[in-house]
Amino acid sequence: MKKLLIAMVALSCFALCGYGQTKMEKQIIGKWCNPYTYQSTGELKGFEFKKGGKCSAINIPVYDLRTWKIDKEGYLIIEGFSKEDSDEMQPYYTRERIGYLSKDSLELVTREKNPRLVFLYINTKKIKKLVTPEVAPKEK
């Protein structure tokens, strides 16, 4: 009986750990854009995270993003290609800690200290309600 109880507790812990990541993965699916870029230029620039681990850049032509995942430590990993530092596409990989995630906002910590660097993204379903651009938004 004691072994059965221990096994049930262990299975519950594994189930809860898996649930947390699944919930985070479900929450991140969608289009996320930088509110400061939208406010200053009226352009939506950011990322789209799709089901099945597919992703793409929104209005950032230097990126040809392909995949995303969230690792066990809560880091968002994005892979694809970039021509950010040259004229030719190069492999691109980034691993950034998810500082905060809700249905409306995503905070990615790209550097922990000296100085701490954090990027904020807002779900495009909400960005136009929460942020007023200083210029007329560019429509596509």
Image (cartoon, rainbow, N blue to C red):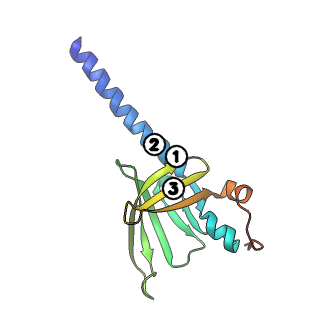
For the residues marked 1 and 2, what is the alpha-carbon distance in whole angstroms? 6 Å
The answer to which of 54 and 46 lies nearer the viewer is 46
Q: Residues within 10 Å of mark 3 (few under 14, many from 20)?
A: some
Locate the C terminus and report the quarter of the image it occupies: bottom right
User: In the rendered structure, which disc, 3 or 2, sits on the residue that comes first in sequence?
Assistant: 2
Tell me which residue sits at (56%, 75%) in the image. 60
Residue 12 image-quadrant placement: top left
For the residues marked 3 and 2, what is the alpha-carbon distance in whole angstroms? 18 Å
Residue 38 lies, in percent from the top left, at 66, 68
Decide if residue 101 is on the left or right side of residue 134.
Answer: left
Kindly indicate whether the residue at mark 3 contacts the one at mark 1 (C-beta within 8 angstroms). Answer: no
Residue at numbered disc 3: 107
Check the image and report above or below for 17 versus 10: below
Residue 21 lies, in percent from the top left, at 43, 43
Residue at numbered disc 2: 22
Q: How crowded is mark 1: few (under 14 residues within 10 Å), some or many (20 or more)?
A: some
Kindly indicate whether the residue at mark 2 contacts the one at mark 1 (C-beta within 8 angstroms). Answer: yes
Locate the N terminus and report the quarter of the image it occupies: top left
Residue 111 lies, in percent from the top left, at 39, 63
Q: What residue type is labelled 3?
A: Glu
Residue at numbered disc 1: 26
Residue at the left extreme of this rendering: 3
Q: Which amino acid does label 1 sit on?
A: Lys
Tell me which residue sits at (61%, 57%) in the image. 122
Tell me which residue sits at (73%, 68%) in the image. 133
